[in-house]
Image (tube, rainbow, N blue to C red):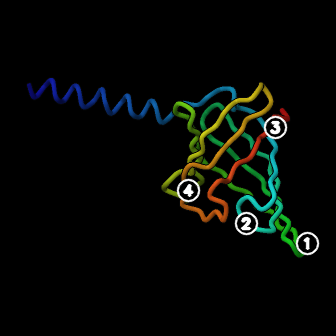
Amino acid sequence: MKKFLLVASVILFSFGFTIQSKTDTRLIGTWKGSEKSGQVAGMQKSWIMTRKGNGTYKIEFSAKDDEGKITTSSEKGKWWTSGNQFYEQYEGNETPTVYTYKVLDAKTIYFKLKSSEDDFENENYEFVDTKID
């Protein structure tokens, strides 16, 4: 009985890890997107996101506030999918941001925020990524 429980635990642990590390290959590549007042009121934001098949990503942001000040930043981390959920975990953050996603066509993906440790002024935050490479 102990052997059975040990084997079952190892199988369940392995299965859970496999789900977490799955990537939807349709999301691999270089994508662009933009939004206005989605995360922060009055802020216009655009980005270039590169998702690799090994589950890593890099994103370059450009943001313009309502006074015209432009700032740039970048972030890198890990990404994976499970069902219709997209997980994005940037370096230094222990909890991933979770979005539901829908592939609209080969070059367009719709995302809607499900949960995040970061502050979003709009709890219904959503955006579209368009493939550029």
Q: Which amino acid lies under the numbered mark 2 shown in the image of this protein?
A: Val
Q: Residues within 10 Å of mark 1 (few under 14, many from 20)?
A: few
Give the mark nearer the N terminus: 4 vs 1: 1
Give the mark nearer the N terminus: 2 vs 1: 2
Q: Which mark is residue 116?
A: 4
The residues tagged by marks 2 and 1 sit, at their Cα atoms, a distance apart of 14 Å
Q: Is residue 19 above or below residue 48?
A: above
Mark 2: which secondary structure?
loop
Q: Residues within 10 Å of mark 3 (few under 14, many from 20)?
A: some
Residue to which mark 1 is pinned: 68
The residues tagged by marks 4 and 1 sit, at their Cα atoms, a distance apart of 27 Å
**Quadrant in which residue 53 is drawn:** top right
Q: Which amino acid lies under the numbered mark 1 shown in the image of this protein?
A: Gly
Give the mark nearer the N terminus: 2 vs 4: 2
Query: Disc 2 vs disc 3: which is toward the camera?
Result: 2
**Quadrant in which residue 9 is drawn:** top left
The residues tagged by marks 3 and 4 sit, at their Cα atoms, a distance apart of 22 Å
Residue to which mark 2 is pinned: 40
Q: Between 54 and 49, which is closer to the camera in this rendering?
A: 49
In the visual, does 109 lie left or right of 100?
right
Mark 4: which secondary structure?
loop
Report the residue at 49% width, 54% height from top.
95
Callout count: 4
In the visual, does 80 lie left or right of 37?
left
Q: Which amino acid lies under the numbered mark 3 shown in the image of this protein?
A: Thr
Q: Which amino acid lies under the numbered mark 4 shown in the image of this protein?
A: Ser
Report the residue at 62% width, 49% height from top.
113
Find the residue positioned furthest to the left. Answer: 1
Looking at the rendered image, the quarter that the C terminus falls into is: top right
Looking at the rendered image, the quarter that the N terminus falls into is: top left
Residue to which mark 3 is pinned: 130
Q: Position of residue 88 (x, y in %)?
A: 59, 46
